[in-house]
Amino acid sequence: MTELPAQPVVYEVNTRVWLRETARRTAGPAGLADVPKDVWDEITPSGVDAVWLMGVWERSPRGRAIALENPALRGAFAGAVPDIGEQDIAGSPYCIRRYEVDEALGGAAGLAAARAELDRRGVGLLLDYVPNHVAPDSPWVGEHPEYFVQGDQEDARRDPDGFLDTGHAVLARGRDPFFPPWPDVVQLNAFAPALRRATEEVLKSIGGVCDGVRCDMAMLMMNDVFARTWGERAGARPQEDFWPEVVSAVRRLHPHMVFAAEAYWDLEWALQQQGFDFCYDKRLYDRILNESPESVRGHLQADEQYQRGLVRFLENHDEPRAARTLPAAKERAAATLIATLPGATLWHEGQFTGRRVHLPVFLDRRPDESPDPSLREFYERLLAAVHRSNMRTGRWQLLDCEGWPDNDSGRDLIVSCWSGEAGRHLTVVNLSDHPAQARIRLPWSELGQGGVELASLLDIERYERAGAELTGSGLYVDLPPWGTHVLSVAPANVSLPAH
């Protein structure tokens, strides 16, 4: 087992797509145990702490059949891959029949081989868990109807889109409170004691083959949310919430197992309190893409400890590709910001090479796209530099910018610093499409009256300034549109006058 650092860098891989492309490259078998070492090296560049192999569990044949009959889904599939064929449609990785590694990927032995390769590199392994629902052909449907939200024959007759008649029981189809039911899954009952025990056992088993889980739509199982979604159908509301009960039981067996929540609706803090190590920071994603630098800065004023429990990202399998949603220069600026913030960071396979097609997760083939070597070089240099610096082992704080009466462009700068045993580090990001200038007063009074060297982590630039200036009037910065500085800050060998 690889114990993950306090603020891990996670690399998400669409497992079936990746294996299919690997087999095409190597003209060899397509299982997890067959991946060459150099291909593992490609998805574990310096700075990556964990790989999330998305979609390893046994997918539902019945769920796949439902998807094949859905005109809207088939349209989305053809929109992403115009020549898509039925043989390329694997079904949803979140319509899970059983938590057993799909034999098409090499089964349990293949996953064990993959974990060993990652472990040799000091890289952890994350896998999926879907707490809210299972496939309609899951063994639980026939063997344990008590695990599910139930209806009756009248429900099945009146609302066939919302209820499934299994022949033995009528079970609700899975949903969240803001959308119609999903046609390919059946709703588990977060209030059922038997379901909670079963969830604990599944997660204990998963914890034996990986280092952590990403829990899909985790907020749906919270007592308040579940009660609003299902009302009386859920039965008596338990005194204890779902996640504290389940996570504490699993951690008695796997004390270092990481729990990461896909979370929305501003429930990140509540889920952290309920046992999750990390929760998606969708708010930051939305603000970077669609709002002002002041909005981003306001978001980053939250308590540091809370921010350490967030997952920062610019794309994942649910979101459009960054290369499509962001201009190239803005993507680099936003990535620099994300990489130097507290919390976990999530990067998506294909993001580093500039892929633009957002692939539906049902598919195991994607279109060929020309890679962008300069973008890959940028990302790998950024992650490696932040990793080498060890800056994120220290304490983080957001800093203020000071402008002038006739120049308030500094409002578009996001400035933060790290302080700790690894030294002092400063990040400045111009999150705008125009130049920005400001002075930044550094918080390190111990720099005193001596000279200070500011060395870029991303290139060979070095600057010398007087410590009195940096802690007095402040460091003067002038950045072009989408410009960045990532600097180490240390006493220089000479004293410099303030100016």
Image: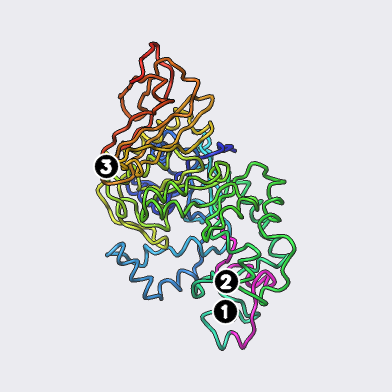
Cβ–Cβ below 8 Å for labels 2 and 1?
Answer: yes
Secondary structure under the numbered disc 2 in the rendered image: strand
Q: Which residue is pictured at 33% across the width and 21% down the height?
A: 499
Colour scheme:
rainbow
Q: Which mark is residue 82?
A: none
Q: Is residue 137 magenta?
A: yes
User: Extreme top residue here?
Assistant: 494
Residue under label 1, please give it. 164
- The amino acid on which the numbered mark 1 sits, given as a three-letter code, is Leu
Instruction: Say which label, 2 or 1, has the lower sequence index.
Output: 1
Circle 3: is it few (<14), some (14-19), or many (20+) Cα within 10 Å?
some
Q: CA distance from mark 2 to mark 1?
A: 8 Å
Q: Which residues are magenta?
A: 129-155
The kind of secondary structure element at disc 1 is: strand
N-terminal-most mark, 1 or 3 = 1
What is the quadrant of residue 159 in the picture? bottom right
Q: At which x and y percent is residue 183?
A: 49, 74
Residue at the spot x=35%, y=20% of the render? 465
| Left or right: where 35 falls relative to 168 | left
Q: Residues within 10 Å of mark 1 (few under 14, many from 20)?
A: many
The alpha-carbon separation of the residues under discs 1 and 3 comes to 55 Å
Position above or below: 357 against 155: above
Question: Does dot 3 land on a helix, a strand or a loop?
Answer: loop
